[in-house]
Amino acid sequence: MIWNGITAVALAAVCASQLHASQAPAPAAEKSKVQVDRLTAWPKPADKSTLIVDIERLCKARTPEMGTQAHDALKACAASAVPFLLERYGKERDKDAIERLHEVLLETTDATQTRLLAKHFTSKSAAERTFALWRAAAFPDPELAAPANAALETVKKQGEKADPDESYSAALCAASAGSSQGMEILWAAAFKQWDSRGVEIRTAIEPLRGPEATQWAIEKANGGALKEKVAVLRLLAGCGDKSSTSFVRPFLDESDNTLRVAAVNALRGIVDGDPPLEQLPVFEVIEMAKQWKLKLI
């Protein structure tokens, strides 16, 4: 990985694409409305001085053992380490150190911390803001609508100067909180970057499922090329309501297998709330399409 010219924010995006796929909750997991006790303050570390030393050891990691020991120690500190890790993450410039910090942050952040992560949406560090928005989006929390929308509005005002990763993360977080203000940004990501960002987009847009998001997505398909229609079907899997099945059904008869797979996955999400299936053999997709056509009669 080339470091020259790459900002901490850009590297954070690279870390996200590499690590988030295995860490993000699957969309189906969000169907169970489990009560989450949200933290109102970061727990105090048992030994702040040692924690700071461990963060330094993690960043320097002169030997693999040194990095592993620091990683394990910080992971054991759990939530109490997060604000200190975030602060260093926002300042660090060494690419390897950023990757190690990112990995520990993934392992020490969870759904209980969304309200606390929101306090970092206004950090002076773009890397810190981007990570906080992106990570909070993995744990949909309606209380984050206002701060996420504010963050999104801030980056929109920057116009072409806005960092694309921060814009995307703000849109992702806003959607996960139930706001459609960033759908244009997520549409672009679904169209261009589904392979790396599809899982997190699907998770984030679940709270938007309903007539408004359905109509918005369907209108994007009007006159669109194949890739645009595929992107629309992928979005409908996460945000489409059952009225959209009539729009999706004709795609089950498409000869293009990518469209057919997208249609099957859209119906899985719309009708049953199930996650998408990937890498399906053509014959299996054809059979599934037949079953869905019978089911929709």
Image: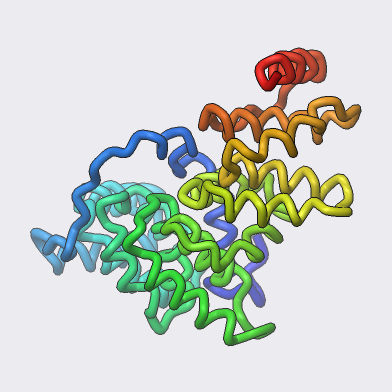
Q: In the shown orientation, is residue 210 left or right of residue 5?
A: left
Residue 276: % across, % down: 61, 32
Reply above or below: 205 against 29: below
Q: Quadrant of residue 14?
A: bottom right
Q: Residue furthest left?
A: 46
Residue depicted at 27% across the width and 49% down the height: 75
Reply above or below: 215 against 246: below
Q: In the shown orientation, is residue 217 left or right of residue 63?
A: right
Nearest the viewer among 81 and 250 is 250
Residue depicted at 31% across the width and 59% down the height: 114
Q: In the shown orientation, is residue 64 left or right of residue 256?
A: left
Residue depicted at 60% across the width and 28% down the height: 268
Which part of the image, by quadrant, shows the C terminus?
Answer: top right
Residue 99: % across, % down: 48, 58
The number of numbered discs placed on residues in the rendered structure image is 0
Which part of the image, by quadrant, shows the N terminus?
Answer: bottom right
Q: Quadrant of residue 144?
A: bottom left
Nearest the viewer among 74 and 37 is 37
Q: In the shown orientation, is residue 182 left or right of residue 144?
A: right
Colour scheme: rainbow
**Can see residue 20?**
no
Reply above or below: 113 against 72: below
Residue 175: % across, % down: 50, 58
Residue 41: % across, % down: 16, 65
Nearest the viewer among 31 and 195 is 31
